[in-house]
Image (spheres, rainbow, N blue to C red):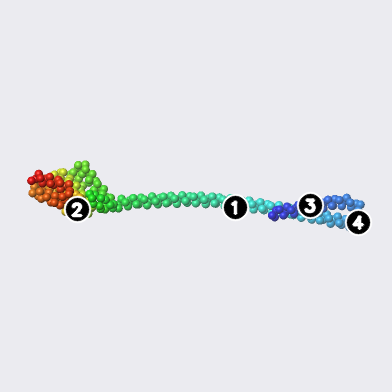
């Protein structure tokens, strides 16, 4: 707005100066015939002075307008520099925000992985619920691992080694939920190596733990077999009779009936 006003002023002053110049020229030509007196010369001098003042004013306005234009240009350059600096700062901040977002995402991923690793490590030590031979109980991971190792040895037919492993297992885990099953397979390993007295003790220990365990009827039949191997026929018959009386629906009871028929 200021520049436009200045332009208008310059135009007007230019027009005045031009008109004054024309008048001076015309009056200069006519002064020889019309104005010979002092008053005419004075009027011409006044007019010339006005033209000079107008030219000076025009020059001053031009200079001021030039200065203002230069100042405005410098201000625009400064403003452009400030805008560029702001854009650069914003771009830098956006880059920092994006990096921060990536860092946060990476930290969250690492935290999630760490939590999962801790959970997995805890699960390695936390007891788990198992069901073995019809009984449900809690067992530590190490406890299950050692029992499985003993069973693997037994299934390989390494009965002497299996005895050592099962005995060690029962000593290290005296209150284990695997105990009835471990006693049963220990007794079978001992019977396989013809260690009938120790086998008899293992099977009787299982029976003494509780009559509701699914291996008890088989253990009682195994007791009778040990007695027969030890030439205790009378004791074997009594054991078989008790098996038939107490567990009549079991497969072991059916086998006991067949044994009793042969013994009699």
Pointer 2 or 1: first along the chain: 1
Q: Is residue 76 visible?
A: yes
What's the distance in space between the residues labelled 4 and 2, CA to CA? 155 Å
* Mark number, residue 212: 2
In this rendering, would 44 be left or right of 77?
right
| CB-based contact (under 8 Å), mark 1 and mark 4 | no
Q: Which residue is mark 1?
A: 82
- Mark 4 residue element: loop
Pointer 1 or 3: first along the chain: 3
Q: Position of residue 204 (x, y in %)?
A: 15, 51
Q: Which residue is mark 3?
A: 15
Q: Nearer the viewer, residue 4 or 258?
A: 258
Q: Position of residue 108 (x, y in %)?
A: 42, 51
Query: Of discs 4 and 2, which sits in the foreground?
Result: 2
Q: Is residue 205 visible?
A: no
Pointer 1 or 4: first along the chain: 4
In this rendering, would 211 be left or right of 118?
left
User: The N terminus appears in which quarter of the rendering?
Assistant: bottom right
Query: Of discs 3 and 4, which sits in the foreground?
Result: 3
What's the distance in space between the residues labelled 2 and 1, CA to CA? 90 Å
């Amino acid at each position: 707005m200021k520049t436009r006003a200045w332009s208008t002023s310059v135009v007007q002053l230019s027009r005045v100066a031009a008109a004054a110049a024309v008048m001076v020229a015309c009056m200069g030509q006519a002064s020889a015939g019309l104005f010979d007196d002092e008053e005419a010369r004075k009027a011409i001098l006044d007019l010339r002075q006005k033209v000079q003042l107008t030219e000076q004013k025009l020059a001053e306005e031009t200079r001021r307008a030039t200065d203002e234009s230069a100042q405005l240009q410098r201000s625009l350059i400064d403003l452009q520099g400030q805008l560029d600096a702001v854009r650069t700062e914003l771009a830098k901040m956006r880059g920092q925000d994006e990096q921060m977002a990536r860092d946060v995402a990476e930290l969250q991923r690492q935290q999630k992985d760490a939590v999962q690793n801790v959970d997995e490590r805890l699960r390695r030590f936390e007891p788990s619920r198992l069901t073995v031979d019809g009984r449900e109980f809690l067992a530590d991971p190490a406890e299950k691992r050692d029992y499985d190792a003993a069973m693997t040895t037994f299934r390989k037919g390494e009965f002497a080694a299996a005895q050592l492993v099962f005995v060690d297992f029962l000593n290290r885990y005296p209150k284990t939920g695997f105990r009835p099953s471990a006693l049963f397979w220990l007794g079978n390993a001992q019977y396989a190596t013809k260690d009938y007295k120790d086998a008899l003790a293992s099977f009787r220990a299982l029976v003494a733990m509780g009559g509701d365990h699914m291996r008890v009827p088989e253990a009682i039949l195994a007791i009778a077999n040990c007695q027969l191997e030890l030439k205790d026929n009378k004791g074997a018959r009594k054991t078989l009779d008790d098996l038939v009386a107490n567990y009549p629906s079991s497969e072991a009871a059916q086998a006991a009936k067949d044994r009793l028929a042969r013994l009699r």
